[in-house]
């Protein structure tokens, strides 16, 4: 193995219950005096969002919100948000929400000053250097779910509303200037979202841990992230007001996202086309396809997973770990098959094609081919 890589763990995170009260100060630290708070429609009417706007207003930073954000946000949401940002004379974004609100908020701050279409900044090679970095507005990120870890990431996922393909848009300056991780914000998450987002964090840690690239820092973070999810996700699911469990899951989510610099894999490569076509929840979809991907990868990861199992206190090596995943899914009420989420077999060939070009597939320990990827979809549906 070539001992080589590009590593980046630079985010300033203010972590702790109640720290949303520091939101205005965080904006000022990021150089923002007229923020646009970006969130999704569901969160727009909730108390946690009103409270965040109150804090901004009380500090003299105005009270502006854009919430026309779909789950799996798309280019139309982005265009509308950029218009509101420009028309309102804003100088930064508070990206507030689950991955959908966070990603779209980050992308609005990125695109507000650009002239090229967003697709020119897909995460391919050095395409990000096409952007005018001096025109990128700062953003402060406030996660309200514990899953995507988008708050510590330099990318946003955007669905193309015409082709329904999910693309990763990347620029180093999309990285939030300051993050407020306040576990109290996640207390009101519905059970299914707690489960699905938590399993997204688990999938990030698992795929990063399993990928063959060289990144020992990520490897360690991924392993501890797996442990935190194992210990605390069932607790957060059973009792949403368990703040210790909520806090540990918030850490696990951020850890998953820094860990997946090391690579993702077939769970995400398969999940992205499903989400793009059927609008299923991202993390829940990951959890559904996880066992089939573990089986596919077994020959390459058996030893490594056995080591993780030992660390997690799971007996029985790879088989023990596999059984644990099946049990965890059941405990969290995750559907067994994609078919249970409304995914049919009629568009498998199209999804296989999309999965094969999905950038996350490159980290999968077993090389994805048309044949094994089709078999994966068949097994999952
Ligand atoms: N940028 C990245 O690195 C990255 C990584 C993984 C996934 N993603 C993207 O993130 C998105 C998924 O994010 P998500 O799983 O966090 O879900 P989400 O942001 O789509 O939110 C799911 C639902 O939960 C609601 N919600 C959020 N927080 C809540 C709270 N505290 N209380 C009550 N309801 C709440 C929202 O209103 C929404 O209806 C997808 O678009 C996916 O592509 C991005
Ligand atoms: Fe994910």
Image (tube, grey):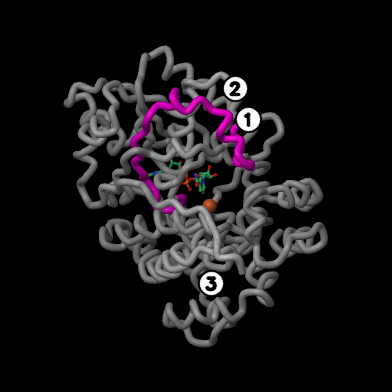
**Residue at 52% from the left image edge and 22% from the top image edge:** 114
Q: Is mark 2 within 8 Å of ligand 1?
A: no
Quadrant where the C terminus lies?
Answer: bottom right
Q: Position of residue 170 (x, y in %)?
A: 54, 39
The vertical placement of 250 against 325, above or below, is above
Q: Position of residue 272 (x, y in %)?
A: 63, 48
Quadrant where the N terminus lies?
Answer: bottom right
Asked if residue 122 lies in the magenta stretch, the reply is yes
- Does residue 208 appear left or right of residue 28 in this picture? right
7 or 340, nearer to the observer: 7
Instruction: Tell me the element at label 2.
Output: loop
**Highlighted magenta segment, given as a residue range:** 119-148
**Residue at 55% from the left image edge and 77% from the top image edge:** 305
**Residue at 61% from the left image edge and 79% from the top image edge:** 302
**Residue at 26% from the left image edge and 47% from the top image edge:** 14
Label 3 packing within 10 angstroms: few (<14), some (14-19), many (20+): some
Q: Residue furthest bottom?
A: 316
Nearest to N terminus: mark 1 or mark 3: 1
Determine which residue is flagged by label 3: 325
Residue 120: mark in rendering: 1
Q: Nearer the viewer, mark 2 or mark 3?
A: 2
Q: Position of residue 361 (x, y in %)?
A: 66, 55
Quote the CA–CA distance across marks 1 and 2: 7 Å
Determine which residue is flagged by label 2: 116
Quote the CA–CA distance across marks 2 and 3: 43 Å
- Does residue 41 appear left or right of residue 59 in this picture? right
Label 1 packing within 10 angstroms: few (<14), some (14-19), many (20+): some
Quote the CA–CA distance across marks 1 and 3: 38 Å
- Labels 1 & 2 near each other (Cβ < 8 A): yes
377 or 309, nearer to the observer: 309
Nearest to N terminus: mark 2 or mark 3: 2
């Amino acid at each position: 193995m070539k001992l080589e890589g590009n590593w980046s763990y630079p985010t300033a995170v203010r972590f702790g219950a109640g720290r949303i009260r520091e939101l205005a100060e965080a904006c000022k630290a990021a150089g923002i005096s007229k923020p646009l708070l970006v969130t999704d429609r569901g969160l727009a009417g909730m108390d946690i969002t009103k409270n965040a706007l109150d804090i901004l207003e009380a500090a003299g930073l105005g009270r502006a919100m854009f919430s026309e954000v779909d789950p799996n946000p798309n280019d139309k949401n982005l265009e509308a948000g950029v218009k509101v940002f420009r028309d309102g004379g804003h100088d930064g974004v508070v990206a507030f929400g689950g991955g959908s609100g966070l990603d779209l908020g980050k992308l609005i701050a990125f695109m507000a000053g650009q002239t090229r279409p967003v697709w020119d900044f897909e995460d391919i090679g050095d395409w990000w250097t096409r952007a005018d970095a001096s025109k990128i507005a700062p953003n402060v990120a406030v996660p309200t779910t514990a899953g995507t870890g988008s708050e510590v990431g330099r990318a946003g996922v955007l669905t193309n509303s015409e082709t329904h393909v999910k693309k990763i848009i990347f620029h180093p300056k999309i990285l939030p200037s300051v993050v407020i991780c306040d576990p109290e914000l996640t207390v009101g998450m519905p059970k299914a979202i707690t489960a699905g987002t938590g399993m997204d964090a688990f999938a990030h840690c698992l795929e990063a841990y399993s990928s063959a690239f060289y990144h020992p820092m990520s490897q360690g973070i991924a392993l501890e992230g797996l442990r935190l999810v194992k210990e605390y996700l069932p607790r957060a699911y059973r009792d949403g007001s368990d703040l210790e469990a909520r806090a540990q899951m918030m850490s696990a989510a951020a850890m998953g996202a820094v860990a997946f610099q090391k690579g993702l894999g077939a769970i995400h490569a398969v999940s992205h086309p499903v989400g793009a076509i059927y609008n299923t929840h991202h993390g829940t979809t990951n959890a559904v396809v996880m066992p089939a991907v573990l089986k596919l990868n077994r020959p390459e990861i058996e030893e490594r997973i056995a080591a993780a199992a030992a660390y997690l206190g799971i007996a029985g090596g790879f088989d023990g770990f596999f059984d644990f995943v099946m049990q965890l899914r059941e405990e969290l009420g995750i559907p067994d098959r994609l078919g249970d989420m409304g995914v049919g077999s009629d568009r498998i060939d199209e999804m296989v094609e999309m999965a094969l070009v999905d950038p996350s597939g490159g980290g999968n320990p077993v090389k994805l081919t048309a044949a094994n990827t089709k078999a994966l979809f068949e097994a999952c549906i």
